[in-house]
Image (spheres, rainbow, N blue to C red):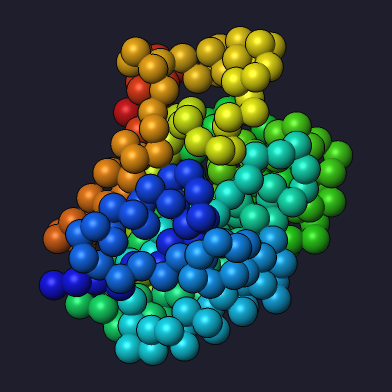
């Protein structure tokens, strides 16, 4: 039976590839991005998040079957915290009532292997406390760790939320996907800088012959958003070419 899937960050990269995969399967996709898709919304701002939820609700008043919180940026800038953490959480929480109307609701947050990198506990804890102004202020003092901080906070939020009554107790399976380096518009500029390429090879070593394409990550997201069993929840599934296993061989 065709499903209704909401995808943020649907205009490019992993989000676009996932939207295309669902549409090819005959599902209805409500894409969200700054522009270039169904719903235009700026998820870096509270008013943009609220407007997104309102428009999705208007388009699918009887409910949705899946959500991919995929909108994200990678900048040494506090806006990364606003989009990657607060935008993602607002998406998932704001659309949860629509998910609850589905017979098989599923949700996925795009986290990252960056979640295991060192960063600022102050930023992460402010995020988890829901204190956006404090998190952004703290990030401004350590902007270089904005991306890993945002993804660590999102991963921790996802794992805590997934087992709550309003998620698992309502039959809504919430999981995270942890891509490694993906060849996408967001990462393309990085490969033009030899120093950045060397840093990537050190922070994200891979056992595969090359980095993933967005379409490869989309396959795994499609599985998480369509899997029948609700028993899979609260997991961060690394799709990283082996980076996690290489960096943390004793962790499982």
* Res 148 visible: yes
Seen in the image, is 27 located left or right of residue 153? left
Q: Residue at x 43, y 84 (%)?
A: 59
Could you say where residue 165 lies in the image, as x and y percent from the top left?
A: 36, 72
Q: Residue at x 71, y 34 (%)?
A: 145
* Res 159 visible: no
- Number of callouts: 0
Q: Residue at x 58, y 49 (%)?
A: 72
Please tell me which residue lies in front, 177 or 138: 177
Determine the image quadrant of residue 23.
Answer: bottom left
Quadrant where the C terminus sits is: top left
Determine the image quadrant of residue 169.
Answer: bottom left
Quadrant where the N terminus sits is: bottom left
Looking at this view, name the residue that lies furthest to the front.
Answer: 36
**In this picture, is 157 found above or below 91?**
above
Could you say where residue 51 lies in the image, as x and y percent from the top left?
A: 61, 79
Please tell me which residue lies in front, 24 or 250: 24
**In this picture, is 100 found above or below 230?**
below
Could you say where residue 110 lies in the image, as x and y percent from the top left?
A: 46, 48
Determine the image quadrant of residue 62.
Answer: bottom left
Could you say where residue 8 lies in the image, as x and y percent from the top left?
A: 49, 60
Seen in the image, is 200 located left or right of residue 64? right
Please tell me which residue lies in front, 82 or 188: 188
**In this picture, is 203 found above or below 103?**
above
Q: Residue at x 73, y 61 (%)?
A: 132
**In this picture, is 117 found above or below 51?**
above
């Amino acid at each position: 039976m065709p499903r209704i899937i909401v995808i943020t960050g649907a205009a490019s990269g992993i989000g676009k590839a996932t939207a295309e995969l669902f549409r090819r399967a005959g599902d209805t996709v409500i894409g969200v991005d700054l522009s270039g898709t169904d719903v235009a919304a700026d998820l870096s701002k509270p008013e943009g998040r609220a407007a997104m939820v309102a428009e999705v609700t208007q388009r699918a008043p009887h409910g949705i079957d899946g959500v991919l919180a995929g909108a994200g940026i990678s900048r040494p800038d506090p806006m990364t915290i606003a989009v990657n953490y607060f935008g993602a959480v607002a998406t998932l929480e704001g659309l949860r009532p629509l998910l609850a109307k589905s017979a098989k609701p599923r949700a996925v947050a795009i986290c990252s292997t960056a979640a295991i990198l060192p960063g600022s506990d102050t930023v992460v804890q402010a995020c988890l406390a829901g204190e956006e102004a404090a998190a952004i202020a703290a990030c401004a003092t350590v902007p270089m760790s904005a991306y890993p901080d945002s993804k660590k906070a999102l991963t921790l939020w996802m794992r805590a939320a997934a087992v709550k009554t309003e998620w698992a107790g309502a039959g809504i399976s919430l999981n995270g996907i942890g891509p490694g380096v993906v060849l996408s518009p967001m990462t393309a500029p990085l490969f033009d800088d030899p120093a950045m390429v060397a840093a990537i090879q050190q922070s994200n070593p891979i056992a595969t012959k090359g980095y993933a394409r967005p379409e490869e990550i989309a396959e795994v997201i499609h599985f998480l958003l369509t899997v029948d069993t609700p028993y899979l929840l609260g997991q961060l599934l690394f799709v990283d070419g082996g980076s996690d296993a290489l960096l943390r061989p004793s962790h499982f």
